[in-house]
């Protein structure tokens, strides 16, 4: 992907000159070798997210961001914290370092509003990713990259309808995350059956499993469980197996374990929002903005999903999940 994008970018910068094709090839070759494909200044871009520790989704986002940073001659910094106030403190630290561009998530928008405004006031271009598309422009960001969470939830609801499901549980693993609430809202909006929200302690997997298991044991009419993150899908599968009965587990997001579970049939489907692309495009768009004041989509949200992934798709995507790009 990086080589292709570098080639396209190279062709764009070269315009219609007679050497444009050769320059594009040279940039693509450099990017493929992990070398900078441009000669712009060594800018520093920072990404600050609401991720907790050990979340494979954000590993994939970082992989995309680092790939683009290498191509664009960017020094890439990363910080994260699941607590909104601490995430805001991390953003302030990046502002204090006078970074040249900032990428943030707005899962807890109230905690992030003031510090994002400080970054904008300081002249630091900001792009939001993954969560907070409805607040991005209001807070002063250039654009948002990710999926519309309500639309993604609706895609899940429609898929459940096609599978003949009647009663679903939507498992929310992070209190206060507006994106998670929107996902479950979307499921309820499109699903013809009944949806119940189940709040769990996402930092404690044994607790997550016992909470889901208890819910399934107390209500035998539940025929589907929807988790909002790939790391929670295997845990939900274990809970469903322990509870007994025929309960399908489906999930948002994709990683190697989810791809494997889709192939062996323990998971029904996944909703992929392409985290690699979110990281890659965020860095690339900041570089384009700094270099040429370009902004893809004219400032409107750039969608990277949702894509429904089933057993038929999983085998093809498995090799990409193993290398950490899907």
Image (tube, grey):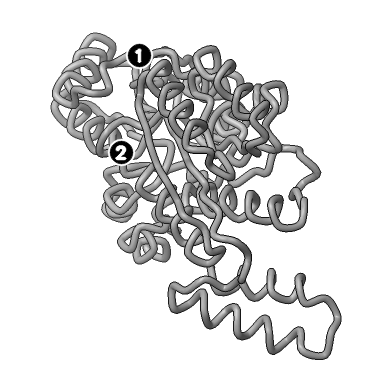
SS at circle 2: loop
Q: Identify the residue shown where x is 50% and y is 14%.
A: 111
Please say if the residues under marks 1 and 2 sit with CB atoms less than 8 Å apart: no
Q: Nearer the viewer, mark 1 or mark 2?
A: 2
Mark 1 burial class by Cα count in 10 Å: few <14, some 14-19, many 20+: some
Name, please, the residue furthest toward the top. 218
User: Callout 2: few (<14), some (14-19), or many (20+) C-alpha neighbours within 10 Å?
Assistant: few
Considering depth in this image, is 208 or 292 the residue closer to the camera? 292
Residue 102, quarter of the rendered image: top right
The residue beneath circle 1 is 198
Dot label at residue 55: 2
Q: CA distance from mark 1 to mark 2?
A: 20 Å
Q: Residue placed at 47% from the left, 47% from the top?
A: 275
Horizontal arrangement in the rendering, residue 319 relative to residue 47 (left or right): left
Task: Give the mark count.
Answer: 2
Mark sitting earlier along the chain (1/2): 2
> In the depicted view, which residue is nearer to us: 142 or 187?
142
Residue at 49% across / 18% down in the picture? 108
- Label number found at residue 86: none
Residue 169 seen in the figure: no
Q: Position of residue 25 (x, y in %)?
A: 63, 85
Give the left or right position of residue 281, taking residue 77 as reference: right
Q: Does residue 41 appear in this view?
A: yes
Q: Position of residue 160 (x, y in %)?
A: 49, 32
The quarter of the displayed image where residue 10 is located: bottom right
Which quarter of the figure is the C terminus placed in?
bottom left
Residue ID at (45%, 35%): 48
Could you say which quadrant of the image residue 306 lies in?
top right
The correct choice, above or below, for 215 with respect to 324 in the image is above
Residue furthest toward the right?
16
Name the spot of residue 4 as percent of width and height, x first: 60, 73
Q: Where does residue 159 sit, x and y in percent of width and height?
A: 52, 36
């Amino acid at each position: 992907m990086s080589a292709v994008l570098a080639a396209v970018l190279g062709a764009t910068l070269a315009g219609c000159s007679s050497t444009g094709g050769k320059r594009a090839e040279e940039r693509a070759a450099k990017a493929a070798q992990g070398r900078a494909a441009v000669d712009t200044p060594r800018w520093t871009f920072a990404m600050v997210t609401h991720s907790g520790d050990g979340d494979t989704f954000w590993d994939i986002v970082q992989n995309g961001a680092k790939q683009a940073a290498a191509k664009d001659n960017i020094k890439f910094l990363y910080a994260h914290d699941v607590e909104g106030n601490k995430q805001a403190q991390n953003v302030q630290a990046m502002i204090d370092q006078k970074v040249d561009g900032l990428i943030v998530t707005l899962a807890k928008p109230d905690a992030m509003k003031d510090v994002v405004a400080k970054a904008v006031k300081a002249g630091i271009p900001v792009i939001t990713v993954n969560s907070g598309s409805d607040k991005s422009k209001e807070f002063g960001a250039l654009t948002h990259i990710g999926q519309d969470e309500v639309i993604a939830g609706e895609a899940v609801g429609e898929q459940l309808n096609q599978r003949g499901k009647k009663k679903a549980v939507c498992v929310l693993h992070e209190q206060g995350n507006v994106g998670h609430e929107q996902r479950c809202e979307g499921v309820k909006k499109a699903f013809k059956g009944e949806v119940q929200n189940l709040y769990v302690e996402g930092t404690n997997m044994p607790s997550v499993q016992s909470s889901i298991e208890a819910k399934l044991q107390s209500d035998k009419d539940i025929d589907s469980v929807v988790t909002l993150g790939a790391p929670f899908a295997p845990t939900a599968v274990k809970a469903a197996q322990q509870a007994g009965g025929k309960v399908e587990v489906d999930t948002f997001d994709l990683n190697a374990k989810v791809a494997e579970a889709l192939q062996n049939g323990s998971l029904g489907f996944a909703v992929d929002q392409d985290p690699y692309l979110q990281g890659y495009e965020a860095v690339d768009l900041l570089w384009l903005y700094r270099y040429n004041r370009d902004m893809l989509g004219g400032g409107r949200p750039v969608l990277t999903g949702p894509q429904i992934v089933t057993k038929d798709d999983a085998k093809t995507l498995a090799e990409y999940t193993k290398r950490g790009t899907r």
